């Protein structure tokens, strides 16, 4: 039976976070179940872009600090790495601004670049995933434009190197295809342990432009599917309504049946997050998945650039998998004849200059 622990954590105070994460890991068997003395352990946080910790876009550095200390207490050697969207050449800018570099220096952990890859099943996966003895995934809980939520399963997508992640969107533009692709990548990278940062989560238009929500939760599990199923249920979704979870469960990568998941830690009834707001492009919390699929062709949304806010950092243009973003002397604009609606530009924009525009039917459904 899969095990998931859910523990209250009210703030990012160093001592409080460490105690909460240690208790969460202890509830599923303790760090000794996952890390042995002398092991090389790769920590894979969710570092989407170069944002400050208080912006809630990246895994919080205090959560990473706590995991470093817990791994070291078991005798593990710690490395930290990720492949942020659009930052394949400037990953250290992300490490610096997110606070991960400071924590790594203070705790004696090595920062690594995902700039070497090994092709597995057609995907360039970071060599560090295979060079380590164990990987621990440390996702940040947020909504997501394509996958509805991003948690343990989606975080392993970041083991794909460089801009190939954006290219995957052009190869799998439909939600169903992209969910299948994420599940395949998770099957390759499959972490030994997942620790979820939902102390402060992001609701609404995540994963970078949503609204911060104090959830006060950390979670731990060896089973990413089970973890994602539990957090989905907490916010009012059925686990298999999230297509990434459905695909991963169907592929035998973990358990999505809540009756077969052993939940420990704090009493689940004490977590009240049922009013969690999904993004405006996802109807599944408001209409059944079957109906949502039937009206999908009528529901339209697309990214739009606010030139008054745009700072011409070029991230959206570099990240776009179909070269739909153009520039002129007035700034950047989107060629909607090319745009596939993957929302990669919206995801990586650090200035919230890219919003989501909806058609009339979409507004009628979502309000």
Image (spheres, rainbow, N blue to C red):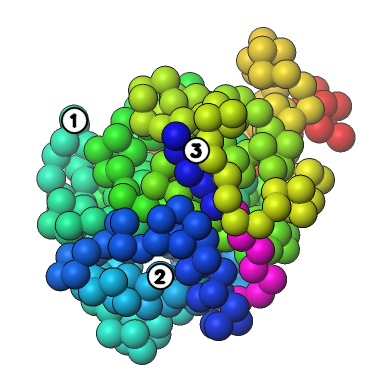
Of 66 and 367, nearer the camera is: 66
Q: Tell me the magenta residue range.
A: 6-12
Local packing at callout 2 (Cα closer than 10 Å; few below 14, some 14-19, many 20+) is many
Local packing at callout 3 (Cα closer than 10 Å; few below 14, some 14-19, many 20+) is many
Dots 2 and 1: beta carbons under 8 Å? no
* Residue depicted at x 13% and y 45%: 118
SS category of the residue bearing label 1: loop
Of 203 and 224, nearer the camera is: 224
Dots 3 and 2: beta carbons under 8 Å? no
Q: In which quarter of the image is residue 34?
A: bottom left
C-alpha separation, residue under disc 3 versus residue under disc 2: 20 Å
* Residue depicted at x 50% and y 24%: 246
- Residue 144 placement, left or right of 211: left
Where residue 15 sits: x, y (%)? 55, 83
SS category of the residue bearing label 2: helix
Point out the tag, 2 or 1, that comes first from the N-terminus: 2
- Residue 66 placement, left or right of 289: left
* Residue depicted at x 31% and y 56%: 33
C-alpha separation, residue under disc 2 versus residue under disc 1: 30 Å
Where residue 136 sits: x, y (%)? 34, 57
SS category of the residue bearing label 3: helix
The quarter of the rendered structure image containing the C terminus is top right
Tag of residue 67: 2
Residue at the spot of label 1 = 121
Q: Inspect this view and state whether residue 112 appears.
A: no
Q: Quadrant of residue 254?
A: top left
Q: Which of marks 2 and 1 is in front?
A: 2
* Residue depicted at x 36% and y 44%: 157
The quarter of the rendered structure image containing the N terminus is top left
Residue at the spot of label 3 = 226
Q: Does the magenta stretch include residue 10?
A: yes
- Residue 244 placement, left or right of 123: right
């Amino acid at each position: 039976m899969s095990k998931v622990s859910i523990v209250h954590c009210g703030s990012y105070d160093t001592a409080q976070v460490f105690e909460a994460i240690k208790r969460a890991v202890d509830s599923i068997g303790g760090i000794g179940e996952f890390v042995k003395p002398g092991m090389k352990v790769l920590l894979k946080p969710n570092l989407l872009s170069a944002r400050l910790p208080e912006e809630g876009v990246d895994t919080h550095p205090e959560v990473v600090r706590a995991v470093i200390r817990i791994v070291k207490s078991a005798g593990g050697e710690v490395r930290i790495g990720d492949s942020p969207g659009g930052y394949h050449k400037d990953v250290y800018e992300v490490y610096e601004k997110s606070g991960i570099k400071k924590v790594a220096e203070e705790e004696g952990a090595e920062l690594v670049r995902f700039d070497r890859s090994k092709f597995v099943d057609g995907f360039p996966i970071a060599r560090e995933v295979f060079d380590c003895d164990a990987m621990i995934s440390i996702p940040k809980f947020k909504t997501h434009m394509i996958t509805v939520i991003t948690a343990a399963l989606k975080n392993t997508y970041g083991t794909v190197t460089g801009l190939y992640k954006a290219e995957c969107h052009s190869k799998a533009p439909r939600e169903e295809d992209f969910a299948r692709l994420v599940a395949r990548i998770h099957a390759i990278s499959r972490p030994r342990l997942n620790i979820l940062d939902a102390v402060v989560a992001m609701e609404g238009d995540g994963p970078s432009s949503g609204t911060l929500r104090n959830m006060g939760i950390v979670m731990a599990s060896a089973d990413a599917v089970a973890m994602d199923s539990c957090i989905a249920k907490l916010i009012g979704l059925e686990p298999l309504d999230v297509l990434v979870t459905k695909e991963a469960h169907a592929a035998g990568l973990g358990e999505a049946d809540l009756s077969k998941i052993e939940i420990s830690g704090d009493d689940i009834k004490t977590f009240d997050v049922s009013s969690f707001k999904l993004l405006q492009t996802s109807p599944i919390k408001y209409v059944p998945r079957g109906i949502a699929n039937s009206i999908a062709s009528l529901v339209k949304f697309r990214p739009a650039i606010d030139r008054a806010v745009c700072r011409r950092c070029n991230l959206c243009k570099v990240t776009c998998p179909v070269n739909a973003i153009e520039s002129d002397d007035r700034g950047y604009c989107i060629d909607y004849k090319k745009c596939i609606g993957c929302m990669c530009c919206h995801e990586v924009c650090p200035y919230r200059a890219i919003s989501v525009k909806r058609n009339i039917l979409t507004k009628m459904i979502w309000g």
